[in-house]
Image (tube, rainbow, N blue to C red):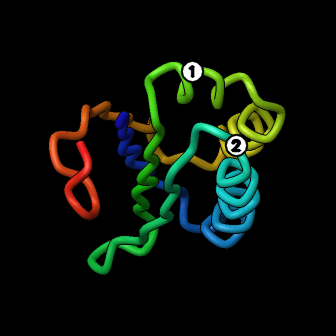
């Protein structure tokens, strides 16, 4: 399992537009064969801070995701809405869901 956590700080005037664009990316990503999960989380303390939690079967499934039309559209659309560069942290699963590693 390959998991990516992406933290995004969005400029306040663009929060709703960011959510809509991110939902489009998330829905399309869930249709990808190698994607297992795509969660969009919003901070309770800072409503302009988001965490995208993405799980893929393998690392190359994530790499393929970054080449899809919907991801490239999302990346271009939201670029100017970010208050700072997004931070992606990559992980390898050692315990996932019901315990499948």
Q: Residue at x 41, y 44 (%)?
A: 6
- Classed neighbour count for the residue bearing mark 2: other residues with Cα under 10 Å, few (<14), some (14–19), many (≥20): some
The x, y position of residue 28, in whole percent, is 75, 52
Q: Position of residue 50 (x, y in %)?
A: 43, 61
The answer to whether residue 41 is above or below residue 88 is below
Question: CB under 8 Å between callouts 1 and 2?
Answer: no
Q: Residue at x 42, y 71 (%)?
A: 42
The correct choice, above or below, for 50 with respect to 80 in the image is: below
Q: Residue at x 31, y 31 (%)?
A: 90
Reading the chain from its start, which is encountered first: label 1 or label 2? 2
Residue 57, image x and y in percent? 46, 36
* Helix, strand or loop under label 1: helix
Dot label at residue 63: 1
Asked if residue 25 lies left or right of residue 83, the reply is right
Q: Is residue 98 above or below residue 65?
A: below
Q: Residues within 10 Å of mark 1 (few under 14, many from 20)?
A: few
Front-lying residue, 66 or 13: 66
Quadrant hosting residue 26: bottom right
- For this rendering, which residue is in front, 87 or 91? 91
How many labels sit on residues?
2
Quarter holding residue 27: bottom right
**What residue is at 25 percent from the left and 32 percent from the top?**
92
The x, y position of residue 32, in whole percent, is 70, 43
Relative side of 49 to 18, left or right: left
Query: In the image, is 64 to the left or to the right of 82?
Result: right
Q: CA distance from mark 1 to mark 2?
A: 12 Å
Decide which of 21, 25 is in the foreground and name it: 25
> Which element type, helix, strand or loop, lies under badge 2?
loop
The disc label shown at residue 11, or none: none
* Image quarter in which the N terminus is found: top left
| Residue identifier under label 2 | 32
């Amino acid at each position: 399992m390959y998991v990516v956590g992406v933290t995004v700080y969005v400029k306040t005037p663009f929060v709703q537009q960011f959510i809509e664009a991110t939902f489009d990316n998330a829905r399309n990503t869930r249709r990808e064969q190698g994607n297992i999960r795509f969660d969009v989380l919003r901070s309770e303390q800072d409503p302009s801070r988001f965490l995208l939690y993405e799980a893929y079967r393998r690392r190359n499934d994530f790499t393929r995701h970054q080449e899809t039309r919907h991801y490239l559209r999302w990346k271009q659309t939201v670029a100017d809405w970010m208050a700072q560069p997004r931070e992606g942290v990559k992980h390898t699963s050692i315990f996932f869901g019901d315990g499948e590693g």
